[in-house]
Amino acid sequence: MDVDEENTVTASVADSSTVGADDQTVVPAIDTISVQPVQPIIAPLITTPVVPSIAPLPAVPLPVPRPLAPLPVRPPIIRPPLGQNGDLRTSDSDSDQDELGSGHGAAGESQEYEISEESRLVRERQEKAMQELLMKRRAAALAVPTNDGSVRARLRRLGEPITLFGEREMERRDRLRMLMAKLDAEGQLERLMKAHEDEEAAAAAAPTEMEEDIQYPFYTEGSQALLEARKEIAKYSIVKSALRLHRARRKQDDPDEDLDAETDWSLKQAASLVLDCSEIGDDRPLSGCSFSHDGKMLATCALSGVAKLWSVPEVKKVTTLKGHTERATDIAFSPTGYHLATASADRTARLWNTEGSAQRTFEGHLDRLARIAFHPSGKYLGTASFDKTWRLWDVETGEELLLQEGHSRSVYGLSFHHDGSLAASCGLDSLARVWDLRSGRSILALEGHVKPVLGVSFSPNGYHLATGGEDNTCRIWDLRKRKSLYIIPAHSNLVSQVKFEPQEGYFLVTSSYDMTAKVWSSRDFKPVRTLSGHEAKVTSLDVVGDGQCVATVSHDRTIKLWSSKDNEKVKTMDID
């Protein structure tokens, strides 16, 4: 019991103790030694108001800076070796040099820049180009022989092959030039001088040996038949030119002759041309046509290889000419008789009579034929071919008199001067050439067309020549001035054929792939009449001797005759 009471007193005393706000222990007034169970007296406590403390602001963690990556080493800037003024430039501006200098200061003088593979290749390429340029300059300053024999001799003395497979003269000379420049650049002047001295010694020992070994023919020796033909042509042309000049002087000096009135009347006749007749000519497109010298017959040829004769003006078939194995490309009547010639893609030309029998075949061309033409004397026939040549044949014997080269591409058109002294050829090389038949020389090369020339025709006045081509223009050339006199923007498509009026040349007729034929004045080259009616390309045309009728053929397989109205009135009056 005593123990329990002591425990109770101790617990009560402990409960009576109070903890202050300032963590101080308040001691009660009753003595702890007393063991009497007396109600304890607690003194009143004065409590001071406790102000709650303000919560501190949360601490924001400061961002930790990342360590900077090391700057990459800047590669050196590669510049072209030469600037605008020819000075060597190593940087684009002063700022680049400053940056490079600062980089050197930071990294130290021991650091070296690495050149990339691409920069190294660019530098090598530039150095190689500079070396080639210097080599070419050095080669251009060297004296290289122009004779092919001397070039071969020097190559042999230099220990080089005198020729390579497929090498031409100019290529061989260029090879020698580059070889000499290379030796000069490498400092092997002794070798060059020794070769030069050997050449001089060889030339002094045998001055004529090289000339005798190598000959350069600049002409082809002709046959005796060609010589006789040239003499005949010269005699014929002298008479014809004398008559032409006499007629021109008479018209100029005779007060009764009014040249302007005659020209106006002829142009008026041409302006009144109308479609008189249209006839189907063949099952295939037509490629050529030609009037007989008296204008009573018309000959046509087609891509079927068949040629036909028609009566004029009725356009009724008279004869069919069969014999070619390929398409026929052109047909021409003889100016002196009832003979006609045809050209074909089978590389041959044939001579026919009006009954339809073949009299002669002209063989020799290596490619298909294009246009053909008779010499005004009727004794010779000219053929143009895609083998880049035109040839002159003897009509009586069929012998080939002349094989004329001169065009770099196919020869397409051919025409003879009315005096018989000249021939004109045109081709796919955009050139027209005038040849002197009496000497065989090319006396004129008419340059001006920008595309192939397909048609050529001499004017009866003797000094005008007309050409037409794929550039849609017709050019008039003055043979006296040796230049182009007038350019006619003739058609909207290529000009397939040109023909002067054969009697006086007062007007010119052109045909085109724009499906029309046009008449032009020879006085001022203005348009006179447009002949429209074909439904396809107009391939060829011809003008009758008096200029009163024009024939055109086309890919629409039709033959069309165009006659003047005044001519119809004259015919009606004659019938009445």
Image: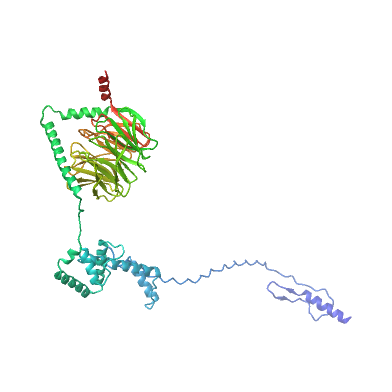
User: Residue 246: horizontal and vertical position, in percent?
Assistant: 12, 34
In the rendered image, which quarter contains the C terminus?
A: top left
Give the residue displayed 20% in from the left and 55% down from the top: 218
From what the image shows, is residue 461 above or below residue 153? Answer: above
- Give the residue at the far top of this rendering: 576
User: Residue 143: horizontal and vertical position, in percent?
Assistant: 19, 66
Place residue 47 in its image quadrant. bottom right
Give the residue displayed 70% in from the left and 75% down from the top: 24
In the image, taking residue 234 as reference, residue 13 lies left or right, namely right
Place residue 320 in its image quadrant. top left
Front residue of this view, candidates 73 and 106: 73
User: Residue 261: horizontal and vertical position, in percent?
Assistant: 18, 27
User: Residue 251: horizontal and vertical position, in percent?
Assistant: 13, 31
Can you see residue 450?
no
Question: How is the model colour-coded?
Answer: rainbow
From what the image shows, is residue 139 above or below residue 240? Answer: below
Give the residue displayed 71% in from the left and 72% down from the top: 20
In the image, taking residue 553 as reference, residue 381 lies left or right, namely left
Can you see residue 424?
yes
- Total of numbered circles in the picture? 0
From what the image shows, is residue 382 above or below residue 113? Answer: above
In the rendered image, which quarter contains the N terminus?
A: bottom right
Front residue of this view, candidates 67 and 383: 383
